[in-house]
Amino acid sequence: MTISGSTEVHSGPIRLGMVGGGKDAFIGAVHRIAARLDNEYQLVAGALSSTPERSIESGLALGLDRDRIYGSFEEMAEKEAARPDGIEAVAIVTPNHMHYPAAEAFLRRGIHVICDKPMTSTLEDAEKLAALARESDALFVLTHNYTGYPMIRQAREMVANGELGTIRVVHAEYVQDWLTVAAEESGSKQAEWRTDPARSGAGGAIGDIGTHAFNLLSFVTGLQTEELAADLHRFVPGRRVDDNAHIMLRLEGGAKGMLWASQVAPGNENGLKLRVYGDKGGLEWLQEDPNKLWFTPFGEPKRLITRNGAGAGPAAARMSRIPSGHPEGYLEGFANIYSEAARAIRAKQAGEQLPAEVVFPTVEDGVAGLKFIDACVRSSEKNGSFVTL
Amino acid sequence: MTISGSTEVHSGPIRLGMVGGGKDAFIGAVHRIAARLDNEYQLVAGALSSTPERSIESGLALGLDRDRIYGSFEEMAEKEAARPDGIEAVAIVTPNHMHYPAAEAFLRRGIHVICDKPMTSTLEDAEKLAALARESDALFVLTHNYTGYPMIRQAREMVANGELGTIRVVHAEYVQDWLTVAAEESGSKQAEWRTDPARSGAGGAIGDIGTHAFNLLSFVTGLQTEELAADLHRFVPGRRVDDNAHIMLRLEGGAKGMLWASQVAPGNENGLKLRVYGDKGGLEWLQEDPNKLWFTPFGEPKRLITRNGAGAGPAAARMSRIPSGHPEGYLEGFANIYSEAARAIRAKQAGEQLPAEVVFPTVEDGVAGLKFIDACVRSSEKNGSFVTL
Amino acid sequence: MTISGSTEVHSGPIRLGMVGGGKDAFIGAVHRIAARLDNEYQLVAGALSSTPERSIESGLALGLDRDRIYGSFEEMAEKEAARPDGIEAVAIVTPNHMHYPAAEAFLRRGIHVICDKPMTSTLEDAEKLAALARESDALFVLTHNYTGYPMIRQAREMVANGELGTIRVVHAEYVQDWLTVAAEESGSKQAEWRTDPARSGAGGAIGDIGTHAFNLLSFVTGLQTEELAADLHRFVPGRRVDDNAHIMLRLEGGAKGMLWASQVAPGNENGLKLRVYGDKGGLEWLQEDPNKLWFTPFGEPKRLITRNGAGAGPAAARMSRIPSGHPEGYLEGFANIYSEAARAIRAKQAGEQLPAEVVFPTVEDGVAGLKFIDACVRSSEKNGSFVTL
Amino acid sequence: MTISGSTEVHSGPIRLGMVGGGKDAFIGAVHRIAARLDNEYQLVAGALSSTPERSIESGLALGLDRDRIYGSFEEMAEKEAARPDGIEAVAIVTPNHMHYPAAEAFLRRGIHVICDKPMTSTLEDAEKLAALARESDALFVLTHNYTGYPMIRQAREMVANGELGTIRVVHAEYVQDWLTVAAEESGSKQAEWRTDPARSGAGGAIGDIGTHAFNLLSFVTGLQTEELAADLHRFVPGRRVDDNAHIMLRLEGGAKGMLWASQVAPGNENGLKLRVYGDKGGLEWLQEDPNKLWFTPFGEPKRLITRNGAGAGPAAARMSRIPSGHPEGYLEGFANIYSEAARAIRAKQAGEQLPAEVVFPTVEDGVAGLKFIDACVRSSEKNGSFVTL
């Protein structure tokens, strides 16, 4: 019962700034908890809102020094880069369309970027950002946070070890119900920007949650998707982006997949589910019950592998803090991405090789996500024909 | 705790014959239990195998009189039709390609037909059979047995009553793993004929189990499917029919659906699952846990409705025999189709109107199933483009 | 996918009579379905009610010949014993206090008895009945029907094979909610006799359902209970028997157990659950999901064994009719007791040894059940002190 | 989707010290994460081990200043009390027998104490500590952390609001398997002290986990336990304390309960489960799936209430950080106790009344826990007779 994955012991927290995430923002607070949980980061600066007064108010409430609360990300990037004790990393948690300009400002100054997903609001921005990141000395980490769940690491390890054999069929779904009604018309700020193509990009459900499902299936199987056929739809009158997406996938090596993303399926809260089947066995995982992974070697009884429990391997153990039977959840999984990033930042700072087991979503995953959205939109416009990614 | 749906009390069992279902047949024995369970039928004649010796051996073992064991269905149809105490109904449980000729022989003689699914091996046969059935005085009942489950009746009633509002999204899947390996090459008779296009028809998984999923979603929602896009695949080398099928559906009224049928997904035994979402609520049902139905009115906690328990209505009650908490299963659901058929046969014999609540799959459902298979094959040949049914 | 446990093929059904089970009786209809399901019995005679008119009406409705519908069990026993085609076995499904006199009448005439549980309403009657049964050539079968569930047979086999090691801890519970209110005062016939000590005996919940839980734990572990401490209680004002029972058990060999029976726990329908733990592994089973058995070898992942699926052995297979993934339920489990009894009756008729794998609850189990009730009442009267059984 | 329960915004973290919790300690790291998660505390001092070198090594690794790492809790209490920036609160996470002397040292100096459970190793110490705490200006908070789970708060609120009616039956169990074998003899430090009566007290399973279950049922129902009957047992040869405990409870107002604590039940990791039934409805909760609460109003379908989802009230919402469907776990529940304590400390520091909704386990709960252990031991020594608490 030791705390296998703990990283709380180190030379001192990484100095972190934040762009976005002021009052009433959901994901900003999540990033802050994730950064804090393993004692790896200290929030010291912020441009927390595009409205300067709001940024100041939010920053003071979070205990930031007044002179490190900025009115814009450009100002923060410039001034922090000039300080000897300036931020080492920045978390970008704005609506999607602001990710690119903010990331650019920090990457160009050698400040590591931890950015929310989807990476940008357009494929063009994504590719520009990827070019920038490849040239930069700074790291770019994308918070496809579900890849931080221990049992997702376990699943990926089992696939890589050949325990499923050759992958044949993959099913991913991310199903919610909160947009069953037109929440964007009744004052929900979360609904407003997520259904506004100018801020979220061309994808609605497909961008907000479909990219998570897509990233997860790629992460676990290690397979690229080559072609897809998508039927995007807007069920709620007046909605400007898709709220339900049906997709068929063809992956490299001949595997086939289906992906379903919906925000209009009553009874589903955050129903992210992944099922992977090979010629030797199958795996099933559900985000709402994340400490368990079902594994069925063909012809044997199903086995329930638990986080840190019997049957779980080192990839899950290093993402775990407490014994199995004591559930870890969403925040811990999110914190795992931050702690992986911290390991990478420290390795870079020390000029050391990053250990092979340290894994996190990168700018390339971000580009893949935007290519996925783009392909879905293209296919849907061609009456659901298969298109290449 | 009365036995609400029981039909054991009546004027005497219906005289039943059987075509197919000799030794080692799986589904024949299931039909016999289903016929017997509610005391509605008595098996009195059989052409149980295409091999006469085998038919005789099987019939004697089942306690049939020697002179009512026949070497062929033609002989049985002719001789039984001539007897004053001849069979009133026949169960056809052969491989698919024999359904049509056998059904024809009995329908032409006014003997009611209870036929296994898919109805025929070709769409052409299905349409010929439908024409025959429409002209005949005899009933044609198709054993899409899952429509006999009480909670499926409950779901259908709730949709019809508007408890889900306008249907938007439907997900059906039927997932198995028994054909993960080439069972047809290692002596499994079940696998042999089900993967032989000459006997099963053009569909593999799509015909054997996909039609069940398709029928179920049609039965519950009451909606016709207008278009579909299908990606059929054969994963096991040497297999002659699809063993995995990914399908996107477009239903009348604008609803969208997905359907997955697979026989190569390790860990799945008979994973038939139906999820239906409307603008007011959602329903979820799983064949492997059939006594429960999840219902979520939008914005309220999920509710677990149990067979004959609180929240269940008359449509479920009349399909139930015992109190909730005591599980009924596959055989009881199958028996419900037989008992619905018995009610219809008795009503016809008495010249009475069939009560509106008596429901069973008909020849039209059989045609719809073959159209579904046909459309899947056509779409798949056109690289997964949408086609009309 | 053959029907492993099927017994439908044999020389002809056993002639069965029934005592009790007229209109509105719950368990009578269950016994009739169970007798019919495997084609092992034919109901040919009945004394279906203590009111002769009601007996006649019920018998005619069931299709019995008028001259084999009797006004009393004594008359039926006498007349059927005198017929050359008289009944070979009788099902006794009356309230508990009538079990003894009815069983006596048939056993004394060499007619096999299949009797509902608890075996009698008093321990004294139970012991008299046991003495009678030991002397009789006829069989006595007690329908502790839950022992007919395939996964209970599987569990028993695994314990016997040592897969759990030495048994340490056993937990059994049978929890319902239907008597949360005073149903016996609002016209429920089922509630009336089950809460009337003159008809049900001294035990309420402990007799009606506690005996099932007790029988099940004895059947699976093979261990005798040596001592128990019970705290029986009546929560509903005016109720004359216990509706909630808490019990601590001490079993032979040093194992410890707990047993809970309740009819006042809202949300529980028929929550019969068994958990058994040894020094090598554990088992868990739930009647409401009966096709699954959890098995955990210590230090390994939990395994889900399914009826007829991977991991299930011959004891489960011979109780199964259909492939795993197609649920069998309460009626099939009940039918398994009837079919085991049929095997025993046929073996006796043929003068053959009963195969070792044929197992059913006997008169000794009935005595054990009454001793259990008696000990619970005695302990509860002594403020919950431990008493010997 | 705002973060309802967040307390991250305030005037600055509370200065915290820690006694125990050095390297290889499990619960110390948990307390540190819990203190950090909501940004309410900063760890600034420690006496992390009874071995000074080990304390120093652990403290440096955690980033403490060298001069605030102490060789003993007495030294820390004295020196920190003398500093103007001394600790405001201390977390005590040693083995049980050291809780009392450490708590005394800090309470006497007006430093708030957050102490692990069970509160002491003897009832005598517990009562002395309670007297001390009542006299002290400092707060005493006991980390019965499971009371911090949002759905436990929800359950407590529903019982208090009368949604279950009069409570009749309560079932609590906490079941593990890690002591199925003699782990204390093979080098597990956790097993060593927990099975050593000198360090853990007279209770084994009953103290380590039984007190959690007991505290939880008291917290949710608000009912005192008046009498209990216990059958404690040691299954593993050589073990010095109980590893399995069966207990029957009698609560004030006539409710009855059962409690089971075991560390020898293979397949159970941290199976803490609570079921509460009243005359109007029932509740069920499972620690391993903590974001859900089953609620059944009598005669209605079961409802699944989710953390922050439909059906959940303010008591759950103020303990939640993220939207329902995103699981929170053990660490978040633990952090909730720390954050409740922070609210109480800040209210005390500000001379304000503590808001009624702020709730945490106190020294009185600690005494109740030791009385529970004591009563279990007494009853067990009297062959399981009922004793008063």
Image (cartoon, coloured by chain):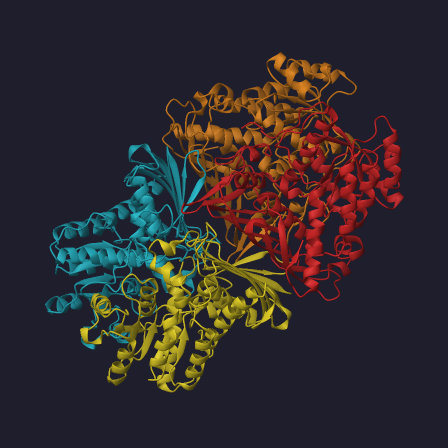
Chain colours: A yellow, B red, C orange, D cyan
Taking the image as shown, residue A66 lies to the left or right of residue C295, namely left
Numbered disc total? 0
Q: Quadrant of the C terminus of chain D?
A: top left
Give the camera-side residue of A164 and B285.
B285
Give the camera-side residue of B360 and D296.
B360
Q: Position of residue C54 (x, y in %)?
A: 61, 15
Q: Position of residue C47 (x, y in %)?
A: 65, 17
Give the camera-side residue of B41 and A282.
B41
- Compared to residue D120, the image places residue C43 above or below, namely above
Q: Quadrant of the N terminus of chain D?
A: bottom left
Taking the image as shown, residue C172 lies to the left or right of residue D310, namely right
Residue D379 can be seen in this image: yes
In this view, which residue lies farthest toward the front?
A: A238
Quadrant of res A75: bottom left
- Residue in the picture at 17% in, 66% down: D87
Q: Position of residue D311 (x, y in %)?
A: 37, 45
Taking the image as shown, residue D144 lies to the left or right of residue A229, namely left
Quadrant of res B147: top right
Q: Position of residue B50 (x, y in %)?
A: 86, 46
- Compared to residue B271, the image places residue B337 above or below, namely above
Residue C300 can be seen in this image: no
Quadrant of res A162: bottom right
